[in-house]
Structure formats: C-alpha cells, structure tokens
Image (spheres, grey):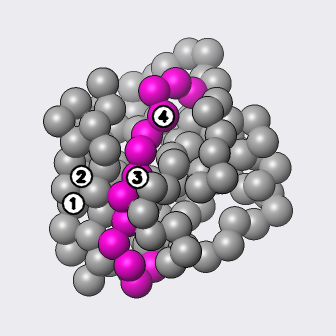
Amino acid sequence: MPSLTVLPHPELCPEGALIVDVPQGVSICRVLLDNHIEIEHACELSCACTTCHVIVRQGYASLDEASDAEEDMLDKAWGLSSSSRLSCQARIGTQDLTVEIPKYTINHAKEDH
C-alpha cells in the first residue's frame, strides 16, 4: 500500500507528516483531511476552485492524468508548477507520494471546515 508524505507547511503541518497505509483510488485531499491536515477546499472537492492545490514532489507519474477541467482550474492556482495537481482530483496510485502544500492560495476568505 502506498504512503503519502507531506512536506512541512507553516500552518497546516509545521513538522511535516507521514501518512502510511494510504488506500489506492482515494483523492489526496480526502487523505489529508481524514488525517487532520486541514488543507483548504472551498468548493468541497468538486474541482471548482484551486484552494486544494498541491505540488507533487515524488510519485507524480503514478497519478492519473489531470482532466481538462482540472487543467483549466490549475491555470488560476498560485505558485503553479509542472507537477501541480488539485488534491481533490488527484487519486492515489500505486507509488508513494510526496506532496508540498503551497504557502498561499487565491482564496480571499479562509473558512473553517
């Protein structure tokens, strides 16, 4: 079973976090939320915003390709890179993943979820 490593983020996980035994087919965002890493997700995981944007530092090739809708949304993300994904759309594959949560989002008002 693959694992998900989250690089340190100043607010969400200052020490970084290792999440083991991650089931395949589950979105990165769902895994983060289920493990108390409160990544923003203003559209409730529906691919309608960019607040759950992550940069996949390891294991990118094991993810399914991004849909056209996800690619369109990613164009609006802060700090976009060639390995950026919306964590609500990127589903865990067969390889271990390492992700970085960008320091900023384009969300103007942060809500507690």
Tag 1 and tag 3, C-beta contact below 8 Å: no
Upstream in sequence: badge 3 or badge 2: 2
Highlighted magenta segment, given as a residue range? 93-105
Q: Is residue 86 above or below residue 97?
A: above
Quickly name the residue at label 3. Answer: 99
User: How far across and how far down the image is residue 85, in percent?
Assistant: 59, 54
Q: CA distance from mark 3 to mark 2?
A: 14 Å
Query: Three-letter amino acid code at disc 4?
Result: Pro
Q: Residue at x 38, y 79 (%)?
A: 95
Q: Is residue 88 visible?
A: yes
Q: CA distance from mark 4 to mark 2?
A: 18 Å
Tag 4 and tag 2, C-beta contact below 8 Å: no
Query: Three-letter amino acid code at disc 3?
Result: Val
In the picture, residue 19 is in which quadrant?
bottom left
Q: Is residue 81 above or below residue 26?
A: above
Query: Three-letter amino acid code at disc 1?
Result: Ile
Tag 1 and tag 2, C-beta contact below 8 Å: yes
Name the one closer to the observer, 107 or 113.
107
Q: CA distance from mark 1 to mark 3?
A: 11 Å
Upstream in sequence: badge 4 or badge 2: 2
Quickly name the residue at label 4. Answer: 102
Element at badge 2?
loop
Quickly name the residue at label 1. Answer: 19
**Quadrant assignment for the N terminus:** bottom left
